Amino acid sequence: MRIIQAFRRSRRLAELPAPSVPASIVDRLPDGVVELTSDDIIIAVNLAAARMFGRSDASLRGLRLSDVLSVTHPAGDSMALRTGGNRYHARFVRGDGDQRIAEVAVSRTDAAPSDGVASHLVTLRDVTEQWEAWENLARSESRYRHLFEGASDAIMTFDAFGRFTTVNDAGEAISGYPRGELIGRFFGPLLAIDALPRAVLEFRRALSGNAGQFETVMLRKDGERRHITVNYACPERSREVLCMIRDATQEKQLQLQLIQSEKMAAIGQLVSGVAHEINNPLAGISGFAQLLLADKSLTPDAHHSAEVISGEARRAARIVHNLLTFARQHAAEKASANVNAIVENTLELRAYEVRVRGTELVCELDPAIPDTVVDVYQIQQVLLNLVTNAEHAMANSARHDHRLTVRTRALGGTVRIEVEDTGGGIPPHSVDLIFNPFFTTKPTGQGTGLGLSISLGIVSEHGGRIWVDNVGGGARFTVELPVTAAGASAVPARRLPQIVRPGLRVLVADDEEPIRMALDRFLASQGHTPVTVSSGNEAVWRAEGDEEFDTIILDMRMPDLSGRQIFEQWRINRPDLSDRVVFLTGDIVSPDLQAFLAGTERPYLSKPFDFTDVVASLGVPKGRLRQRWKAS
């Protein structure tokens, strides 16, 4: 069989036409040259082709070119990547089994063969190493393209004129623009006007070969402002700038909320001291006003004047208390409360400001609304935000007959609070954005954009809703809270009814002379024997001496020894004295003070106080109380 195959091959070789190109010429060429018939049968190969295939020229002659070359890449992809005309790449297997890649160029011969059979030449070049390098480069480019497009941060490059040259997917997301609208465009219009000078300066630094970082504000296509952090470098000096841009808006929000929280904590500490200083003179004013009211010899006009003084003192005390509770940082604490009372207390904080602006304040409070479980301080914060926003809206409106309406009403199983103004309303395009953090319609520097977003969080945490409507030339914000009954354990504090016997000896320790004088005169008028001292040390000396006192009224703050320090000493060494203490304080909102008072189980009086509360405190029996009494 082999003999027959060899015979047939020898006949085919004998029938092949003679090469049209002399061997002496083609053998000098560095590239492989194969001459083919019109049927792609190999007529001749030069030395370089034989070396490339790893076979002798005799073993190649008579074969078809497709027997030694394949247009399929070893990886299975088509190799028919023609570089123009009759150029392509092909795979071949050397005689030793090594797989290689060749660049193939096909051309017709100029010389006519003597036998008249047309032929053409195929030039071959082994490009295996170049092909592998190209594949590695393609894989690397694909890998980095995936990294580029899949990066969570925006990656953008700019030419020397600040025009976008490349933008990844995150760049489209952060800017709101498709990359087709960015490529070739100057970056300036995407930045806030006040941020542009700094950005241009940093861009110039980058072009000079520097790397750096800065923060700025980007304007999205939809007009939303986003805080961004830009890290830049210069791959090609004076030609290209590479920027990695991270959306820092949420971080900025958290930072501002932290600053706001710290500011409120500082205000709480400041107001605590201020409240004590204000409540002391208010207690003196209120005390002497009550003494005047008890004087039966006063004329009607003088009695009315005393009533006005007493009422205004109480009003000032409520304002101080409301301001203190609003500014003080406290843990979330929900309890059954009356929404109307929350509204009234909040409006007292802003009533004067509303009136001096010439705004009519209208309260439409439904007296039939049920109590519900809320955090009083948080709901007060929501209302104060809404009222303040309404004031600003009306201040910027051209109208002169402004009206602020606050109403409450029950609706099904909910309680609604409505704050309505005549400030022109909210632009339609801003209604859906009004509760977004940092969104504000106020001029720069006049608002943080946090008030409504914080209010939304508070109302949502209560299981309620808040929304806004444009009505009657203004805006109406509605807060809807579910009606929730207090738990069985939520028993409201009550005052213990006591019958106070006359002739009690009462020690009063307070560093404020008007308060001592007022208590001294009142207690004496009630048939008691008061003894007043101006310091903590003197109170200890008198109480621990030979005198016997039925009640000891101690101010919580005195220059030498505070009421708290005295009580702690007596609780350990003289429990018979600590069981007779009634505390007097100008700040009952401090969490630390509240915890202390709750632990003593002794009554306390809040400055300014009513004399009826003083009388009730004298009736508390000696010994620890089973239920804490609080003067209201």
Image (cartoon, rainbow, N blue to C red):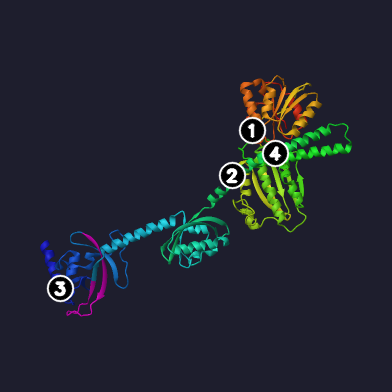
- Left or right: residue 621 versus residue 103 is right
Which numbered disc, 4 or 3, marks the residue that appears first in the sequence?
A: 3
Residue at mark 1 to residue at mark 3: CA–CA distance: 117 Å
Residue 494 screen position, x and y as percent: 71, 28
The residue that appears at 73% across and 43% down in the rendered structure is 348
Please give the label number shown on residue 262: 2
- Residue at horizontal 81%, vertical 32%? 291
Which quarter of the image is occupied by the C terminus?
Answer: top right
* Disc 2 + disc 3, Cβ < 8 Å: no
For the residue pair 195 and 449, the one nearer the viewer reads as: 195
State yes or no: residue 121 in magenta. yes
Q: Position of residue 201 (x, y in %)?
A: 50, 63
Amino acid type assigned to the residue bearing label 2 in the image: Glu
Amino acid at pointer 1: Leu
Residue range highlighted in magenta: 98-122
The residue where tag 3 is placed is 15
Q: Please name whichever residue, 103 or 599, is drawn nearer the observer in this view of the structure.
A: 599
1 vs 4, front mark: 4
